[in-house]
Amino acid sequence: MSDEAIIKVGMADLNVVKAPAILTTLGLGSCVGIALYDTQVKIGGLAHIMLPDSKQIKNNGNVAKFADTAILQLIEEMTNMGARSNRLVAKIAGGAHMFEFKNMDDMMRIGTRNVAAVTQILKELTIPLLASDTGSNYGRTIELHTATGILLVRTIGHGTREI
Amino acid sequence: MGERNYHNITEEEIDMLREAGNIASGNAMTSLGTLLGCTLDMSVVKVRIENIQELTDVLGDAEDFIAGMLINVYGDLNAMLLLALKAESALKAVNLILGKNLNHVEEFDEIDLSVLCETGNILAGSYLSSLNTFTGLELDVSIPQISIDMAGAILSYPAIEFARNDNTMLFIETVFEDTNKVLNGTYILIIDNQSYNKVIDSLGKWL
């Protein structure tokens, strides 16, 4: 393991760094980790969103909680640091179903809805989605290595992969 | 009495919730001890209000390997009960209850998983019937569901449900351990703001 700074992103949180720092978020369940990266200046951003749409929620002050507002905030902070929005690429992970309750259709699909919202917003913003590791029923820890743009996905019992 | 918000919770209200949690957990731990055939010690119950940013670390490290048995509570409260056992403790629980000799949670079959769910169910029954006795609140529960995975991923489920309109979560936590210190876990009641109001109101009639 190299000694680059590792910066933790909590639930409903986001952060932006320059290479060679590593951004990590631990134990993604139904939430989605969104990694944006400018390959040229090697600036990376990572958000850990919980819900698809800020407009459906009254108390939506925390922009990092929602797919729509978190992505815009990431772009703003990254461009302030020197990235260009037209050079950004994306990788995402998470959106699992941790529990399968009956009669809770909405909640059961929250992981899927989060992934769908993120994918749609990236498409609208014409940010290429290079890779994703989403769905199923297990948790994921991710690391965005800003020196390379690699997103490392770790799981318990479902392997480790680089996307 | 107007609508309180748990962000402005008073010391007196914390004491009320803690005492309610103490009695209900004591009951639940007795049931669990009977089921496991051992004696459980529980810590002082804590009333915690945590920011969602730090929520994944509530059960220790976000990546800790745990078995989470989750139950939805309906009726007079909108709540969830989560029984969280470290993977090794879940393994010991299954071995104790079924007289098995498994070495790893990956060996769990459907029966082992349903035994863990049932354990969650029994705890919830004791906890809630105790709560009902001194609050009068009528409570129903869902069928328990289990996930054996990273603590943070398991907590994301209640977090999404309860932190939808808020950036904090209120929960009443009991940490327990058996007297031989081989099995330990955490039991958590998570309630929303409206439920917090109902619990305080109903406890207030008594105290």
Image (cartoon, coloured by chain):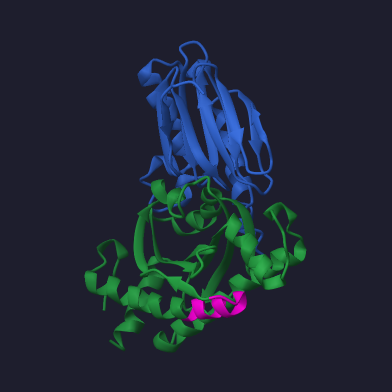
Chain colours: A blue, B green
Q: Is residue B109 magenta?
A: no
Looking at this rendering, what residue extends furthest in the top direction?
A40
Instruction: Pick the residue in front: A151 or B196.
Output: A151
Q: Is residue B34 magenta?
A: yes
For the view shown, which residue lies furthest in the left direction? Answer: B11
Residue A37 % position (x, y): 51, 21
Residue A113: x and y, percent?
60, 46
> What kind of secondary structure does the magenta stretch mostly adopt?
helix
Above or below, B19 relative to B82? below
Q: Quadrant of residue B71?
A: bottom right
Residue A123 visible within the image: no
Above or below A126: residue B41: below
On the image, the x and y values in percent for residue B147 come to: 63, 57
The number of numbered badges drawn on the structure is 0
- Between B23 and B76, the one lying in front of the other is B23
Instruction: Examine the image and state in which quarter residue B8 appears.
Output: bottom left
Rendering coords of residue A106 (x, y %): 61, 57
Query: Where A88 falls versus B81 (above or below)?
Result: above
A155 relative to B89, above or below: above
Q: Residue at x 50, y 64 (%)?
A: B181
Horizontal side of residue B8 vs A57, given as left or right = left
Q: Which residue corresponds to the image point at 51% horizontal and 63% vertical from the top-left? A: B184
Can residue A5 be spotted in the picture? Answer: yes
Q: Residue at x 55, y 43 (%)?
A: A28
Q: Which residues are magenta?
A: B27-38
Quadrant in which the C terminus of chain A is drawn: top right
